[in-house]
Amino acid sequence: MKKAIVTFSILGIFTALVWAFPILAQNGDERPKGLDDRGPLTKITFIHHKKGYAKPAQVGKPKATACYGFLANGAKWKTTEDYRVNPTNPDGLNDNDVMNAVDAGVSEWENYGGNSIFGNSIKDPDITYNESMDGKNSASFGPYADSGVIAVTNVWGYFGGPPQTRALVEWDMLFNTDSSWTWGDATSNPLLMDLRNIATHELGHSAGMDDLYNTSCNLETMFGYSTEGDIIKRTLNDGDITGIQKLY
Ligand SMILES: [Ca+2]
Ligand SMILES: [Ca+2]
Ligand SMILES: [Zn+2]
């Protein structure tokens, strides 16, 4: 996992704030408390590698005893939003297989964190992974430049300032098809890359959870590596459960 943080144009954000609060921007004293302190809208990119790849230099703060981490304390969904899934894939999975795999991951997180994390699932054969925000949360298949990468998830949100002002605003997920493996259901064939397993991990990022790289946390859904046949991330482990319950 490589975490890249791209800060949006400060000027652009300022311009947006001035546009949204023209009077308040001229009189800072009357600005709603907290909004101006929460920091810039930021994108965090999570890259999920296959096992065997070197540990990336930039990783989250590992908690040896807790086995969970957040993108930022308090950075969670404040209102639920629907998510779009494009089931189109080159590996012969039918639409229901894909929809069910992603929806099962959503249900697993909401089973422990409450049902106000994600909204409803929408099948959308036109939705694609985006490097920039378009107002739609999405999961889709497509080629990624690095064939050792299983999946990538972009999460946009306000990660700075007082924790109560932080929030998540969008996520986009890509299942890499430019790879040596075949996507499928590994409970029936361990040679496959299990879509439900990977989707559940990536949806953890969508919910606000960070990767874990300490090998003592390798039973957690949020452990940062996977490989063909891996299905243990389908179900949350103790650290995942503690984390999502603390966040929501
Ligand atoms: Ca999007
Ligand atoms: Ca949004
Ligand atoms: Zn990850």
Image (cartoon, rainbow, N blue to C red):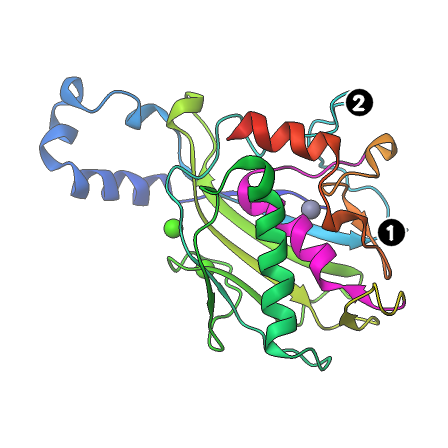
Q: In the image, is residue 226 above or below residue 64? A: below
Which amino acid type is shown beneath numbered disc 2? Ala
Closest to the observer, 8 or 238? 238
Callout 2 secondary element:
loop
Which amino acid type is shown beneath numbered disc 1? Lys
Label located before the other in sequence (1 or 2) = 1
Q: Which mark is residue 51?
A: 1
Q: In the image, is residue 41 above or below residue 50? A: above
Q: In the image, is residue 16 above or below residue 171? A: above
The boundaries of the magenta stretch are: 191-213
Question: Residue 31: x percent and y percent?
Answer: 18, 24
Q: Residue furthest top?
A: 29
Residue 196 sits inside the magenta stretch:
yes
Q: Residue at x 63, y 70 (%)?
A: 98
Q: Which mark is residue 64?
A: 2
In the picture, measured across the screen, residue 151 lies left or right of residue 26, that is right
Q: Residue at x 83, y 63 (%)?
A: 187
